[in-house]
Image (cartoon, helix red, strand yellow):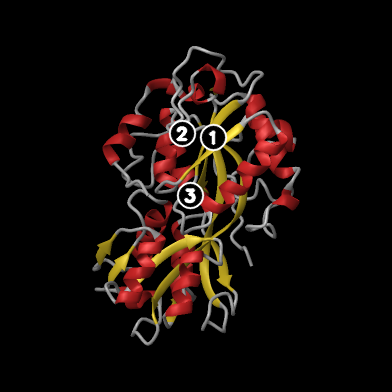
Amino acid sequence: MPSYNRREFLTAVGMAGLASTAGCITSDTEGSDKNTGTDKSSGDKSGGSGGNQLTWDAGGTGGTYYPLSNQFKDIVQSNTKYSLQVRSTGASVENVGSLASGKADFALIQNDVAYFAHKGTGIKEFEGNSVPDLRGVATLYPETIQVIAQGGSNISSITDLQGATINTGDLGSGTQVDAKQILKAVGINDYNEQNASFSQAAEQIQNGDIDAAFIVGGWPVGAIEDLATNTNITIVPIEGNARKKVLNSGSYFAEDKIPGGTYSGIQNPVPTVAVQAMIATVKQTPKQAVQDVTAAIFDNLDKVSNKQEFISVDSAQDGMSIPLHPGAKAYFGKTGTSSGNNSLN
């Protein structure tokens, strides 16, 4: 999985007007580089006739973004004129940089990261480097904050992480953003930060190299399922006063819980918080392309198995934290909102 490069991100979001963004959408027969999504032609950039290629940035293969994106790929390719290249990435923050630079047409990101990017606030990568052209397509499902530790450890609450060695997620990922904000909100200021993918974090827990790991994704997350099958784990609750502090730190956080039985050895529900996964693009992406892709996905949700119980037309604007793309408006028939829904239970 590619690591996040802050210099590349700052260069990407600093491009005035994002002039190259629509260049990712081009006819396969006119010289598009399928490995990078880079346009090598002067062909039609408006999503016109032909087998147009779109680049879609997902996340790590051990999370939910990547397999879900590949299901979307199959649906889009079966129901539109577009081909979809799905790429494994470091997830949300890196994906915003790819959208901003025109290296991706669509991406899965978290609604809190989308808000930070659009406003140019919240985290240092976006301070003074806002992405005002970032646009929403649809929100999908709760991204549950899952804090994992070894079973039998002394970590029974989120406040027990003071002084711990913690994997906060891949550099540049939404997981890292959420982890650091949550730790700050509950007063954890002394910890050794490690950064790795979900799968690597699971290995670190199993080997005893770290005390805890933040994993953000729709449950069940494959990396945690595999870990729980081989190792005694605990899921650290975010509850009580600590949960109130987290909810107060950002309106995009909502109450959530991980049902008992989701992972081997975890019989009781675990209270925590969540953000929302969403599909994002930029305003330069042609309206028809966005409308066609959106329609293909939401008209064929019976073909989606990952998170199907959460994804629907009715909930597709819940928690939408940035302006909606005109192509998505054309499909959903409504404008995007900045929903403050604080409960996903």
Of badges 1 and 3, the one in the foreground is 1
**Residue at horizontal 44%, vertical 73%?**
227
Q: Is residue 40 left or right of residue 127?
A: right
Q: Element at badge 1?
A: strand
Give neighbour class at mark 2: few <14, some 14-19, many 20+ (Cα, 10 Å). Answer: many
Numbered tag placed on residue 99 in the rendering: 2
Q: CA distance from mark 1 to mark 3?
A: 15 Å
First along the sequence among labels 1 and 2: 2
- The amino acid marked with disc number 2 is Leu
Q: Position of residue 126 (x, y in %)?
A: 36, 40
Closer to us: 237 or 79: 79
First along the sequence among labels 1 and 3: 3
Numbered tag placed on residue 281 in the rendering: 1
Give neighbour class at mark 1: few <14, some 14-19, many 20+ (Cα, 10 Å). Answer: many
Above or below for 342 versus 86: below
Q: CA distance from mark 2 to mark 3?
A: 16 Å
Q: Is residue 234 left or right of residue 279?
A: left
Above or below for 305 versus 238: above
Q: CA distance from mark 1 to mark 2?
A: 7 Å
Q: Position of residue 172 (x, y in %)?
A: 35, 48
**Residue at horizontal 63%, vertical 57%?**
306
Report if the CB atoms under discs 1 and 2 are less than 8 Å apart.
yes
Q: Quadrant of residue 136?
A: top right
Q: Position of residue 197 (x, y in %)?
A: 37, 58
Report if the CB atoms under discs 1 and 3 are less than 8 Å apart.
no
To which residue does mark 3 refer? 112
First along the sequence among labels 2 and 3: 2
